[in-house]
Image: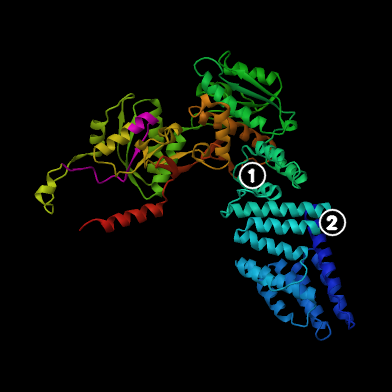
Amino acid sequence: MQASTTTPRLAAVAALAAWLAACQPTTAVRPDASRNAERQAVELAARGEHGAAALAWEQAAAAAPEGQGGRAWIAAAREWIAAGDEAAARRALERAIEPLAPAESRERARLQAELALLAGDPGRALELLEQRGGPEDAALLTTRARAMFALGDVPGAVRTLTARGNLLTRADDRLANQRMILEGMSAAAGRGADLRPAPGTDPLMAGWLELGRIEADARLSAAGTGPRLRAWRARYPAHPANAVLWQEMLDRYATSIEPSSGVALLLPLSGGAGVTGAAVRDGFLAAYYDQPQGLRPEVRVYDVAQTDAASAYLAALTEGAQIVVGPLTRPEVANVAAMADGRATLLALNFLPDGTITPSRFYQFAISPEDEARQVARRSIADGRQRGVALAPANDWGRRVLAAFADEFTAAGGVLVQSDVYAPGTTDFQVILRRLLQIRPAPPDPELAPEDQREPRYVYRDDADFIFVAAQSVTGRLIRTQLRFNYASRLPVYATSDIFDPGSRGSPDLEGIVFPDMPWVLDEAGPAALLRDSMAQTWPERAPARSRLYAFGYDAYTIVAELARRTTPFATPVAGLTGRLVLDPYGRILRELDFAQLRGGHTVPAPTAEEIAAAAMEAADSTPR
C-alpha cells in the first residue's frame, strides 16, 4: 500500500516543483520568511497534509514582496482543492491577482476549471480553459479531459489524454495515464455514454473505446471478460494498451482458483438426468476456459449416474480434490452433507431443508423457485399491492412455491385473500378462475343507455390487487389467455421465472406478466447477452431450452472462485449470470433478481411502485363520472 500512495504524491510534488521553477520571480529577492514557508508547504504536501500545506502557502504569500504573492496564492488554492475545501480555494484564487507570469495565469485558470468541475459545471470548466492560450502541460490536459468525460465527449477526452501521454517520459507515468483513460471511459459509460466506435474510427481510438466498453461491462459482471480481452488483443495487436494495462485487466477480472487446488464436479451425465447435468457441466467448464491457462486448476468430472454421489465424493477426496461442486438433487445433497467433514470446500447444487445443520466449508447454490416466490411476494408489497389471490398446481412443486409465497407475503404484511390449485395437465381453467376471482355478471348500470347494456358485462372480486400464478410457460400462457377471456385482463399477474420461456419472447400471451429472472435471460446488450449469443452459436441445438442451466453452471465456477480467493467472500454482492449473488448466514448463495415484463415481444423492466401509482391516478382521472 505504501508504494501505491507515495508514488502519486512524489509525482505531484515533482510537478509542483517544476511549476514553481517556471514561475520563479526574477526581479526581486524573496524574504526569508516567504522562502521558509514555501519549503514547509512543499514538505507538508509531500506527506499528504494538504490543509496544512495550503496554510503554509498562504503564509508565504503574505510574506512575499508586494505584487509577487500570486504564485503562492495559486499554490495555496491547489492544496485547498486537494484538501477538499473548495471555499478556501476560491478565496485563495481571488487573492492571486495580476501581475501574473504566463504559467501562473494558466494554472489559475486550470484551478478555476477544477472548481467548476467540483461544482458540477464541466461546460464552464472548458470555457475557462479556452480563455487562456499558450502551451498546455500535463496538469491542464488532465483537467480538460475530465471536463470532456463529464460532458460525455469520450473521444475528445481520449484524444486529450493521448496528447498528455505524449508529454510523459517515465513508463510509470504513461501507464498511469492509460489507467486514467480507462477509468474515465468506464465512468462515462456508467453515466450513459455510448462507447461504440463510429464507422471509420481510427484503430487507436476504436481500440480505446472497445476496451472502455469491456471495462464498463466487467464492473457489472466479470463473466466472459477473459475471452473478450483476448479477442480485443487479436484485433489491436499494436495498441499502446496492449501490454501492462491489458494484463492488469485480465488479472483483475479473472475469477480464478489456485491452480494447485483440485476441483471435483459431481453431476449426472447419463441416464434420465444426463441432459440436465451436461448443461451444468458445460457452463462450469465454459467459465473454467474463460480463465488464463496458467490460472486453471485441474478439474475432474464424476458421473454420479454411474455411481452414487456419496461414493463419488469420497473418491474425489481420495484423489486430492480440495473443492467439490455438486451433487445436483436434494437427496444426493443430503447424503453428501451427512458425510462432509470440512476437508474440502463443498458447493452443493441444491438447497437442504431449512434448519439443516451443515459442516464447515459447506455451501449451497440453487435455482430455487421457492426463493423466487419469496422475491415475488416482496416485490408485490413494494409495488403497493398488499391483497392478493394465488393459483398453483396440485403437486409437490406447486405446494412448495405457494407456501413460500404465502409465508413471505403474510410476513411482510400482505393478505392472501384466497388460493386455489389446479391439476397438472389442466388446459381449461375457466371454472377455477371464476371460483377464485368470483367472476360474475355485472349488475345493470342505471347510467347506461339500454342499447349499451346488450353486451354482457362481468366483474371480478374487488378485494384483491393481483393474482400470483405458479406455472410453467405453456400452462401460464393458457391461464393468462383465459383471464382475458373471463374479463379479468386488468388484474395484475405476478409469477416466477418458470412462466417465461426465453424462446417465446414473441408470444403475446404473456404480455404484462411481472416476473423475476436472471441477467442471462433478461440482458439484451451487456456481457450476459454476449455470452448467451456465443453459447447459442457454439451449441445451437442446446439453446434456449438448457440456457438457464448453462448459466447456473457458469456461476457455480464463479462462486467457488470467490470462496477460494477471498478471505471474506461475498463481502459485497457478486454479479453473476443468474443474478446478484449474496451469501446468507447459513452458507446459502442466494440470487437477487431483477423484475421484468414482456412488452411487444421484448423483456423490459417491470414498472416501479411510483410508475404503478401514477398509472392508477391517470386511469382514475380518465374514468367517466
Q: Quadrant of residue 159?
A: bottom right
Q: Does the rendering let one see residue 211?
A: yes
Q: Residue 261, percent across and down?
A: 72, 28
Q: Amino acid at mark 2?
A: Thr
Direction front: furthest residue: 200
Q: Which residue is mark 1?
A: 214
Magenta stretch, residue numbers = 456-477
Nearest the eye: 70 or 579 = 70
Q: CA distance from mark 1 to mark 2?
A: 28 Å
**431 within the magenta span:** no
Say which of 233 and 91 sits in front: 233
In what quadrant of the picture does the C terminus appear?
A: bottom left
Q: Which residue is mark 2?
A: 169
167 or 612, which is in the foreground? 167
Secondary structure, mark 2, is loop
Quadrant hosting residue 535 = top right
Query: Picture coordinates of residue 604 (x, y %)?
Result: 44, 44
Structural crowding at the residue carrying mark 2, measured as other residues with C-alpha within 10 Å and reported as few (<14), some (14–19) or many (≥20): few
What label does residue 601 carry, if any? none
Q: Residues within 10 Å of mark 1 (few under 14, many from 20)?
A: many
Where residue 329 sits: x, y (%)?
A: 51, 23
Q: Residue lying furthest top in this view?
A: 306
First in sequence, mark 1 or 2: give its number. 2
Left or right, residue 309 beside residue 24? left
Q: Is residue 405 above or below residue 76?
A: above
Q: Is residue 279 left or right of residue 148?
A: left
- Compared to residue 237, the image places residue 348 above or below, namely above
Amino acid type at image mark 1: Ile
**Residue 300 appears left or right of 406:** right
